[in-house]
Image (cartoon, rainbow, N blue to C red):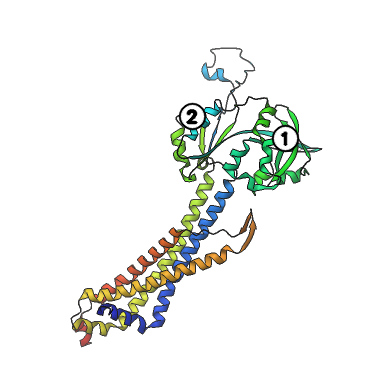
Amino acid sequence: MKLPINYQIAATYLTSKVKQTIVAVLGVTFGISMYVFMNSFMSGVNVAQNRLAFSTLAHVRIYNDRPADRSDIVSHVFPAGTIANIRNSKVIKYTDGIKNSQEIIRYLKTQPLVSVVTPEVNISVFFKNAGNKVNGTLSGVDVAGEDRLFNSAAFMVQGSWKELAYRPDGIFVGIELAKSLSLKVNDNLNILTADGVSHTYKVIGIFQTNLSSVDKAKAYLSIAATRQLLAENQDYVTDIQINVVDFKKANQLVNIISPVIPYKVESWSMANQQLEAGSNLRDIIAVAVSLTILIVAGFGIYNIMNMTINEKIREIAILKAMGFAGKDIRRIFLTMGIVIGLIGGFVGMGLGFIVSDLVNHVPFNVAGLATLPMSYDPEDYILAFSFGLITTFVAGYFPSRKASKIDPVNIIRG
């Protein structure tokens, strides 16, 4: 099928100066490929960071947030001088842990946003082996629930995660903690609580989360064994950990359950604002750099289109003298810009994918990452193509408007 005359003229102009057309296409190609690569890389970094963070961090945590200052309550109630000779006032002992934890867990399981709920008993202890002693955290966990929440079985370097449920005398330790205490599987490890309770357990597994703060100061017991260590009842928990269907909806869940639950309900973003801030900053940087590249490519196209108009000015005058309207001239040069954008867009997306795939195979071997992280989100490719097309359209519009306003009489007269 024969193309309309306007499109035929646009094709002629594009092919008559092949080098200029290639330069314009390469400008768009480079801009779009860098947009795809930058956003894929930043998205990959964010995904990797979230994976590492959520290997030990729940989306929402419920715990008993006791008052920070429980001393000298009397002086807050009665003005100075009202009561005399109060000495050595005692600190009021508040109830530790969460009451009615099973009822709270049943309620949470009815929420559509909730995907996993599991209880924990977390206490600060001393880990002792012979003369070595390390301060850290002992977590009593529901073995199956903890695995659904954090995929804990994947972090085991020695031993089986499921074994913890059947070994009340068994304990899992972080790999750095094991090194600092010279521990191996089947060695004995003594636990000393803040209340002076001491108990010895057998090391039946070693885990590695690739988070130094966890690997060097944390150990796991079954939740039943931890309650027994603390002489607490079977309903006692210090934390209820929750994962939602989408971690970005954690605050939404907090707003729903906070009025109902009489304990502190805290989302991951509330407790770790630096994670969210870092992720947002990386996204802003990626978009800013990529858009800057596309704008620079747009200026290149604008200059090339202007040069083409200056070179073809007598031909444009002849076309207008032959009866071509201003809108026809504008359509010719807009078509040239859009064709450059389409070709550069498709080639740029392909090049961006190739570059991303090559970088994704670069060895990294840090924090459990074998290669540099990369994400292949279709949205990045769609946005890159859209921004590239818009840039080329704008870059072609202004020169085309200039061409449409040329007075053929003045040009032909010279």
Residue 211 makes an appearance in the image: no
Name the foreground residue: 196 vs 234: 234
Q: Residue sitting at 58 percent across and 47 percent down?
A: 53
The three-letter code of the residue at mark 2 reads: Ile
Q: Is residue 56 left or right of residue 375?
A: right
The quadrant in which residue 56 appears is top right
Residue 83 visible somewhere in the drawing? yes
Give the residue at the far right of this rendering: 130
Specify the label residue 261 is tagged with: 2
Q: Are marks 1 and 2 in contact (CB under 8 Å)?
A: no
Residue 141 location in percent, x, y? 63, 36
**Relative to 407, 114 lies left or right:** right
- Where residue 75 sits: x, y (%)? 55, 18
Q: Element at badge 2? A: loop
Tell me where residue 183 appears, x and y as whole percent: 77, 43
Circle 1 Cα neighbour tier, 10 Å, few/some/many (<14 / 14–19 / ≥20): some
In the picture, measured across the screen, residue 111 lies left or right of residue 191, that is left
Q: Which amino acid does label 1 sit on?
A: Phe
Residue wearing tag 1:
126
Depth check: give the residue in front, 295 or 329: 329
Q: In the displayed image of the protein, which residue is found farthest to the bottom? A: 413
> Which of the 4 image quarters holds residue 414?
bottom left
The x, y position of residue 139, in whole percent, is: 65, 36
State which quadrant residue 166 falls in: top right
Q: Which residue is drawn at 55% across and 41% down?
A: 58
